[in-house]
Amino acid sequence: MADDRPRSPEDEPEDEVTFTLQLGGAKDRLLWVLEKLELAVAALTKDAPIKTRLYEAMIELVEVQPGEFPVNLQARYQAILDAVRQMEGPHGTLVASLEQMSEARAEEIAQAIIALRDEVQSRIS
């Protein structure tokens, strides 16, 4: 007679190889996210107007999706994305948003990116 009850992960034999690969894959992805954040922060620390620096930082982050962050950091990254995607324009959403954004708001977003980088870095170290 077959056992038809739902199986939990505890019922399955532990496959250490698969478990290690899954952890390695997640850590590798987080290292990639950190690398992109480092490039963004490097752009933010250049000697240029804040909107130019923020534009260059966001270009570095264009491939990074919120789901690539730890769950409790996804909303913080999504808020950054939302802030720079508020306006539509002939040269794209990012350019239009930056054109309409105050320098003070651009600086706030830049600081949020730096803080997010610091948080991701602390989780890897």
Image: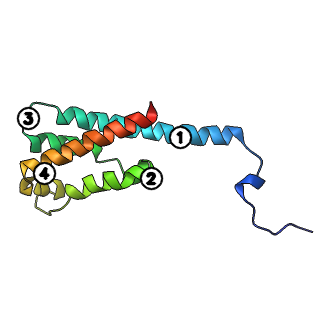
In three-dimensional space, the C-alpha distance between marks 4 and 2, rounded to whole angstroms, equals: 26 Å
Residue 42 location in percent, x, y?
A: 22, 32
Q: Nearer the viewer, mark 3 or mark 4?
A: 4
| Element on which disc 3 rests | loop
From the image, tell me which residue sits under label 3.
Answer: 48
Disc on the earlier residue, 2 or 3: 3
In three-dimensional space, the C-alpha distance between marks 4 and 1, rounded to whole angstroms, equals: 35 Å
From the image, tell me which residue sits under label 4.
Answer: 105
Q: How is this picture coloured?
A: rainbow
Q: Nearer the viewer, residue 60 or 23?
A: 23
Is residue 5 shown left or right of residue 69? right
Q: Name the residue rendered at 50%, 38% in the picture.
A: 27
Q: Name the residue rendered at 32%, 52% in the picture.
A: 76
From the image, tell me which residue sits under label 2.
Answer: 71
Disc on the earlier residue, 4 or 1: 1
Q: Amino acid at mark 3?
A: Ala
| Element on which disc 4 rests | helix
Q: Amino acid at mark 2?
A: Val
Q: Nearer the viewer, mark 2 or mark 1?
A: 2
